[in-house]
């Protein structure tokens, strides 16, 4: 990649172009998310040397939602028995919405850890691993990769989803039916929703992305192979039923969340974080997608692009 200073003008142009996009809608199926200001917008980039570009509301805290699936899977890869993990969740793209239940019923195992069914199964394994300390231990793991020891949960969002998450409850009961959960459904969901309600900024996302880009955790406490495996599944499954189009057009691993956050990783180069609360019918932010499409093209970031 060009030095970060050289892409500042590209980022400014991209930020202004994307700001004009107002398609999509703020998520309402988690009632607490409906209160957010739809016009918030932030873009952060952190390269592997730690240099940063931040634009817009980059200090605004929002909940990770499905971006947490990257970290819960990384945690499971790092600390749980690998054959047990592979038994419980695959690595194939579903081509379905993130909260789809159809394929789970048919195949009796979640397709991948980036969709709700897979992440709920992963959360159960983390509970087995850590017992009653599952929440603090997993948050400490998240913090090691994000580079923050003070991660907090948005309790209102957590409660809101616990109160209303009947679809995830249905998925969890189906998992339980197939013998894929060892703990009570409500306990597993509470931890899964807590992960989704972890708060961060786009700056944190970009730093996390930069760590993934190097496959090397600053504390040295997470295995390189863990981060390689996580990036592989982000590339093929991170954008759900938009994953193929995303790789085609943008060309690097990413993970979306319904609060409007988008984490992208340009291997060996940089992490990119975007936040904009309006999301499309695939659960990703149209501004976030556009920012990445334009950055990828203008800064030549596609993994299969020829060096310029
Ligand atoms: N907490 C949300 C859910 O489980 C996360 C979904 C998402 O961000 N795609 O429905």
Image: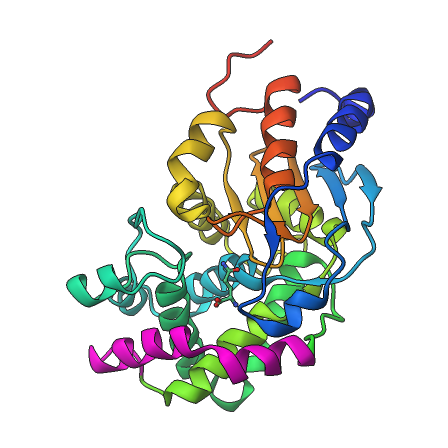
Residue ID at (50%, 50%): 227
Nearer to us in this view, 67 or 281: 281
Q: Is residue 295 magenta?
A: no
Nearer to us in this view, 161 or 79: 161
Q: Position of residue 125 (x, y in %)?
A: 38, 76
- Vertical side of 94 occupied by 301: above or below: above
Left or right: 32 in relation to 166? right
User: From where the camera sits, is residue 134 visible?
Assistant: no
Q: Is residue 170 magenta?
A: yes
| Colour scheme of the picture | rainbow
Left or right: 247 in relation to 150? left
What secondary structure characterizes most of the magenta part? Answer: helix
Residue ID at (77%, 51%): 40
Give the mark count: 0
Residue ID at (23%, 59%): 103
Tell me which segment is drawn in magenta: 155-181
Q: Position of residue 19 (x, y in %)?
A: 75, 36
Q: Position of residue 185 (x, y in %)?
A: 38, 86
Residue ID at (37%, 90%): 184
Quarter of the figure with residue 9: top right
Quarter of the figure with residue 89: bottom left
Q: Position of residue 180 (x, y in %)?
A: 26, 76
User: From where the camera sits, is residue 183 visible?
Assistant: yes
């Amino acid at each position: 990649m060009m030095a970060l200073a050289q892409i500042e003008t590209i980022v400014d142009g991209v930020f202004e172009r994307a700001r004009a996009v107002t398609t999509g809608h703020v998520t309402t199926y988690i009632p607490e998310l409906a209160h957010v200001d739809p016009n918030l917008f932030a873009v952060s980039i952190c390269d592997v040397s730690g240099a940063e570009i931040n634009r817009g509301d980059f200090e605004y805290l929002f909940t990770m939602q499905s971006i947490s699936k990257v970290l819960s899977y990384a945690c499971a890869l790092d600390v749980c028995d690998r054959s047990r993990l592979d038994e419980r969740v695959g690595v194939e793209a579903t081509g379905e919405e993130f909260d789809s239940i159809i394929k789970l019923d048919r195949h009796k195992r979640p397709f991948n850890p980036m969709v709700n069914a897979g992440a709920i199964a992963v959360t159960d394994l983390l509970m087995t691993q850590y017992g009653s300390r599952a929440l603090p231990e997993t948050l400490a793991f998240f913090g090691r990769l994000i580079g923050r020891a003070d991660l907090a949960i948005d309790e209102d969002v957590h409660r809101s989803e616990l109160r209303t998450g009947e679809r995830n409850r249905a998925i969890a009961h189906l998992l339980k039916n197939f013998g894929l959960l060892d703990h009570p459904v409500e306990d597993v969901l509470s931890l899964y929703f807590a992960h989704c309600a972890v708060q961060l900024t786009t700056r944190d996302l970009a730093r996390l992305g930069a760590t993934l880009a190097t496959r090397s955790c600053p504390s040295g406490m997470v295995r390189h192979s863990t981060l390689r495996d996580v990036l592989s599944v982000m590339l093929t499954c991170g954008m759900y039923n938009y994953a193929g189009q995303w790789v085609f057009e943008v060309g690097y691993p990413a993970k979306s969340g319904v609060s409007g956050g988008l984490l992208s990783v340009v291997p060996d180069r940089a992490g990119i974080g975007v936040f904009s609360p309006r999301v499309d019918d695939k659960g990703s932010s149209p501004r976030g997608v556009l920012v990445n499409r334009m950055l990828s093209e203008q800064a030549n970031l596609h993994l299969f692009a020829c060096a310029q």
